[in-house]
C-alpha cells in the first residue's frame, strides 16, 4: 500500500475503517500493561510514590514535541509535495498535540507540588512546555479563523514550520533565562539517569501513548475528511435551484 | 423577542462562531501573563506581589484589542446603515453591542483568571479578589473602549491609533482595579473605597460610552 | 403619502456631487434614478435614508406615521447585503425581522417567497451573490415598510430573480407603497425617471 494510494480520501477512509479497531485494542492493552508496571514499580528513595507521575508526565511531554514534528512533516507535505491529505493530517493533529501538552503541564504541576510547595514553578522544562501549549492554541485558532480549510492549510503550514524552527531557540532561551535567575534546583524532572527498573515501564508507557496518538490521529483525520464532505454537500445544496 | 435582545443574541452568536471565537481574547490574556516572568524573572514572591497588576494589564490589553472590530464588521457589510435606520435608538444599540461583547469576550477573561493566578503564585483568596475587581471593572473597559471602536469606523483606521486614544481613558479603571485588588490581598487600606469607585466608573461608562459611540458613528456613516 | 425633495444639494469629500435637485414620489408610484457611475445616485438614496445630510435643500415626507421619522418608515437596500456569514440564512433574516420591528411576517415564508427556502439552515457564507441579493429582498418582505429606497436592486440577479423582483415591486406599489430606485438598466415597471449628472 503506497503513499499514493493513501492520498485518495476514500481509500484512506476504507483502510482506516479496517485497521482502527485493531489499533485501539493494541493501545488499550499496552496502556493497561504500562499502568500496571508503573503502579508496581518501587518508590524512589527521594521522592517517594510521587515519582510515578513521571510515567505519565514524561511520555506526554515527549509526545507534545513529537506531534509538532508530525505536523511539521504534514506541513511540508502541504507546501512542498502537495499531498492531498497532508493538511487533513496537520489539522487533525493539532488538538491532540495540545491535549498531550496540557496533560504534560498538569502532571508536571502535580509532580512538582510536593517538592515546590506550589502548583507552579517557572522551571525551565515546564515553562518550555507552557510556551509550546500556547503555540498549539495559536495554531488551532489559526485553523478556525479561516472558513475555507484549504486556504487555512497553507497559512497553518507556514506557522507550523516556523514554530518547528523556533522551538529549539525558545528552549535554549528559556534554559538560559532559568539559570540566570535561579540556582540549579535540586529537583530535576526525569532525573539525570534512570534506574533500569523505571526505564522499562517508562518505555512501555511511551509506546502506549504513541499508539494512542496514532489511533486518535487517524480517527480525527477520518472526522475531518467527513466534515469536509458535509461542507461540500451543504455548498452544493445551497447552489441548487429552489425546488 | 425584543429588538435589543435580538441584537445581543446575534452578536454573541457571531462572536462564539467566528474563528477562535472570543477565546482568542483569553489566549491573548494567557500569552501576556506568560510573557511577564520572562521580563521580571521567575521569582515567585515577586510574581505574587505583581500578580494583580499583571492580571489587570493583561485583561486591559485583551479587552482593547478585541474591541477593535466591534463596529467595523457592521460598517463594512452595511448592517450599520440598517441599525441607524431602525426604530431603536443608536445609543441603545451601541450599548447592546458592548454588552454582548463583554459577555462573549470579557467574561471568559474573568473565568480564566483563576488559572492564570495559579501561574503567578497567587493564592485562592487573592485570585478571587482580582477576579471580583475584574468583574466590576471590565465593563468599564468595554464601554470606554467602544468609543475608540466607533472612532475607528469614522476615521477608517484601526489598531494602534485607537489603542493610543483609548488607553488614557482606561487609566482610572486600571488604577482603582489594581488598588482594590491589593487592598483585598494585603490591606491596610480599605477594599471598599477603591472598589466603590471602580463600580462608579463602570456605571458612568455605561452612559458616556454609548452616547459618545453613537455620536461618532453618525459622523462616519458616509 | 408623498416624499419630496426641494433644491437638494450633496457635497462629498469637498466635491459637489449634485445641486438643486427636485423630485417627488407618491403612494403607489416608483421613481427611477438614472445616472452614470459617480453621478450621485447612491448619495441621493443615502440622503433620503437619513444616512447623509444634504448640503442644501430639504427632503420632506407628507403623510405616513406622525411619530416616526422618514428613515424609520423606509427600507434601504444598498450595495452591500448586511449579511453575516457566520449565521445561517434564517438566523440572518430572523434577526432583521426582530430588530427592525413593526409589521413583520414569518421569516421562513419570506425566504420561500424569494426562492431561498431550501437554504434556510445553511451558513449564509455559502450563498452566491445572486442569492445574497435575494436574501436582502426577503428582508423587504419580512418587515413591511411603506418606502423602499433601492440601490441597483437587480445587480447580481439572474433573469428569474429579476422577474421575481418585478413582481415584488408591483405588489408593493399596489399596497400603496413608494419606491425610489437607482438603476443602470430598465427597472421592469413603468416609472418616471430622475436623471442625475447629465446624460447616461
Image (spheres, rainbow, N blue to C red):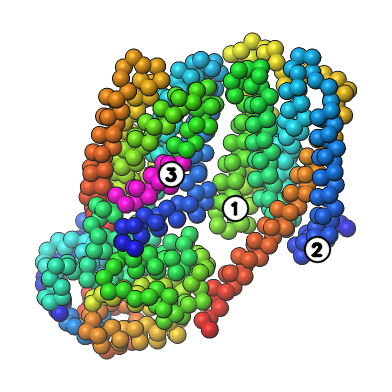
**In this view, the mark in front (2 or 1):** 2
Residue drawn at x 47%, y 38% is B111
Q: Main secondary structure of the magenta part?
A: helix
Measuring from the top left, give residue C186's x and y in whole percent.
33, 84
Query: Which dot, 3 or 1, sits closer to the camera?
Result: 3
Please tell me whether mark 2 sits on a helix, a strand or a loop: helix
**Label 2: how many Cα within 10 Å (few below 14, some 14–19, many 20+):** few
Give the mark nearer the N terminus: 2 vs 1. Answer: 2
Which residue is label 1 attached to?
A: A152
Identity of the residue drawn at 43% across and 65% down: C91
Mark 3 chain = B
Q: Which residue position is annotated with label 3?
A: B105
Q: Is residue C171 magenta?
A: no
- In the picture, the quarter occupied by the N terminus of chain C is bottom left
Where disc 3 sits, the SS reads helix
Q: CA distance from mark 2 to mark 1?
A: 26 Å
On the rendered structure, is B131 left or right of B205? Answer: right
Asked if residue C143 lies left or right of residue B65, the reply is left
Q: Which mark is residue A14?
A: 2
- Of residues C69 and B109, the one nearer the viewer is B109
Residues C136 and A198: in front is: A198
The residue sitting at the top extreme is: A183
| Residue B101, visible in the rendered structure | yes
Q: CA distance from mark 3 to mark 1?
A: 24 Å
Callout 2: chain:
A
Observer-nearest of B11 and C162: B11
**Within the image, what quadrant is residue C22 found in?**
bottom left
Tell me the SS state at disc 1: helix
The image shows residue B123 at horizontal and vertical percentages of 50, 23
Relative to C128, A218 lies left or right: right
- In magenta, the rendered stretch is B95-108
Amino acid at each position: 500500500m503506497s503513499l499514493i494510494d493513501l492520498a485518495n480520501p476514500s481509500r484512506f477512509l476504507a483502510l482506516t475503517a479496517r485497521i482502527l479497531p485493531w489499533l485501539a485494542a493494541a493501545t488499550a492493552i499496552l496502556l493497561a500493561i504500562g499502568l500496571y508496571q508503573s503502579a508496581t514499580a518501587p518508590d524512589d528513595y527521594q521522592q517517594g510514590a510521587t515519582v510515578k507521575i513521571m510515567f505519565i508526565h514524561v511520555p506526554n511531554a515527549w509526545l507534545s514535541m513529537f506531534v509538532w514534528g508530525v505536523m511539521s512533516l504534514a506541513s511540508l507535505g502541504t507546501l512542498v509535495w502537495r499531498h492531498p491529505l497532508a493538511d487533513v493530517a496537520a489539522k487533525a493533529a493539532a488538538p491532540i498535540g495540545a491535549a498531550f501538552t496540557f496533560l504534560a503541564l498538569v502532571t508536571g504541576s502535580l509532580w512538582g507540588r510536593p517538592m515546590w510547595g506550589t502548583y507552579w514553578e517557572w522551571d525551565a522544562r515546564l515553562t518550555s512546555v507552557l510556551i509550546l501549549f500556547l503555540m498549539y492554541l495559536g495554531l488551532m485558532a489559526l485553523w478556525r479563523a479561516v472558513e475555507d480549510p484549504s486556504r487555512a492549510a497553507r497559512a497553518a503550514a507556514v506557522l507550523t514550520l516556523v514554530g518547528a524552527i523556533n522551538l529549539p531557540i525558545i528552549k535554549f532561551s528559556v534554559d538560559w533565562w532559568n539559570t540566570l535567575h535561579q540556582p540549579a534546583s535540586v529537583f530535576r524532572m526525569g532525573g539525570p539517569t534512570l534506574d533500569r527498573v523505571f526505564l522499562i515501564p517508562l518505555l512501555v508507557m511511551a509506546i502506549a501513548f504513541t499508539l494512542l496518538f496514532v489511533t486518535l490521529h487517524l480517527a480525527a483525520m477520518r472526522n475531518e475528511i467527513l466534515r469536509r464532505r458535509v461542507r461540500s454537500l451543504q455548498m452544493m445544496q445551497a447552489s441548487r435551484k429552489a425546488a | 423577542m425584543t429588538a435589543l435582545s435580538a441584537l445581543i443574541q446575534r452578536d454573541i452568536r457571531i462572536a462564539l462562531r467566528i474563528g477562535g471565537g472570543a477565546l482568542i481574547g483569553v489566549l491573548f490574556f494567557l500569552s501576556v501573563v506568560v510573557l511577564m516572568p520572562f521580563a521580571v524573572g521567575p521569582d515567585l514572591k515577586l510574581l505574587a506581589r505583581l500578580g494583580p497588576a499583571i492580571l489587570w494589564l493583561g485583561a486591559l490589553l485583551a479587552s482593547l484589542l478585541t474591541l477593535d472590530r466591534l463596529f467595523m464588521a457592521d460598517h463594512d457589510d452595511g448592517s450599520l446603515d440598517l441599525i441607524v435606520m431602525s426604530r431603536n435608538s443608536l445609543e441603545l444599540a451601541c450599548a447592546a453591542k458592548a454588552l454582548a461583547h463583554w459577555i462573549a469576550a470579557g467574561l471568559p477573561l474573568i473565568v480564566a483568571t483563576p488559572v492564570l493566578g495559579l501561574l503567578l503564585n497567587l493564592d485562592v483568596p487573592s485570585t478571587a479578589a482580582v477576579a471580583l475587581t475584574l468583574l466590576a471593572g471590565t465593563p468599564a473597559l468595554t464601554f470606554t473602549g467602544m468609543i475608540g471602536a466607533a472612532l475607528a469606523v469614522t476615521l477608517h483606521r484601526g489598531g494602534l491609533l485607537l489603542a493610543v486614544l483609548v488607553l488614557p481613558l482606561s487609566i482610572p479603571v486600571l488604577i482603582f482595579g489594581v488598588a482594590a485588588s491589593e487592598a483585598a490581598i494585603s490591606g491596610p487600606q480599605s477594599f471598599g473605597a477603591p472598589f466603590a469607585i471602580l463600580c462608579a466608573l463602570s456605571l458612568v461608562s455605561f452612559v458616556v460610552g454609548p452616547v459618545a459611540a453613537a455620536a461618532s458613528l453618525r459622523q462616519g456613516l458616509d | 403619502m408623498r416624499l419630496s425633495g426641494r433644491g437638494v444639494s450633496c457635497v462629498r469629500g469637498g466635491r459637489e456631487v449634485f445641486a438643486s435637485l427636485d423630485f417627488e414620489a407618491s403612494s403607489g408610484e416608483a421613481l427611477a434614478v438614472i445616472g452614470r457611475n459617480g453621478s450621485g445616485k447612491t448619495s441621493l438614496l443615502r440622503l433620503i435614508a437619513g444616512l447623509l445630510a444634504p448640503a442644501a435643500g430639504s427632503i420632506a415626507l407628507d403623510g405616513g406615521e406622525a411619530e416616526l421619522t422618514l428613515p424609520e418608515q423606509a427600507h434601504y437596500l444598498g450595495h452591500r447585503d448586511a449579511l453575516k456569514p457566520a449565521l445561517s440564512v434564517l438566523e440572518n433574516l430572523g434577526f432583521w425581522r426582530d430588530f427592525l420591528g413593526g409589521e413583520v411576517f414569518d421569516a421562513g415564508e419570506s425566504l420561500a417567497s424569494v426562492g431561498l427556502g431550501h437554504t434556510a439552515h445553511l451558513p449564509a457564507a455559502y450563498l452566491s451573490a445572486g442569492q445574497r441579493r435575494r436574501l436582502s429582498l426577503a428582508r423587504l418582505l419580512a418587515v413591511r415598510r411603506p418606502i423602499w429606497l433601492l440601490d441597483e436592486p437587480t445587480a447580481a440577479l439572474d433573469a428569474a430573480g429579476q422577474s421575481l423582483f418585478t413582481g415584488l415591486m408591483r405588489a408593493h406599489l399596489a399596497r400603496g407603497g413608494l419606491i425610489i430606485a437607482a438603476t443602470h438598466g430598465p427597472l421592469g415597471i413603468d416609472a418616471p425617471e430622475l436623471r442625475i449628472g447629465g446624460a447616461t
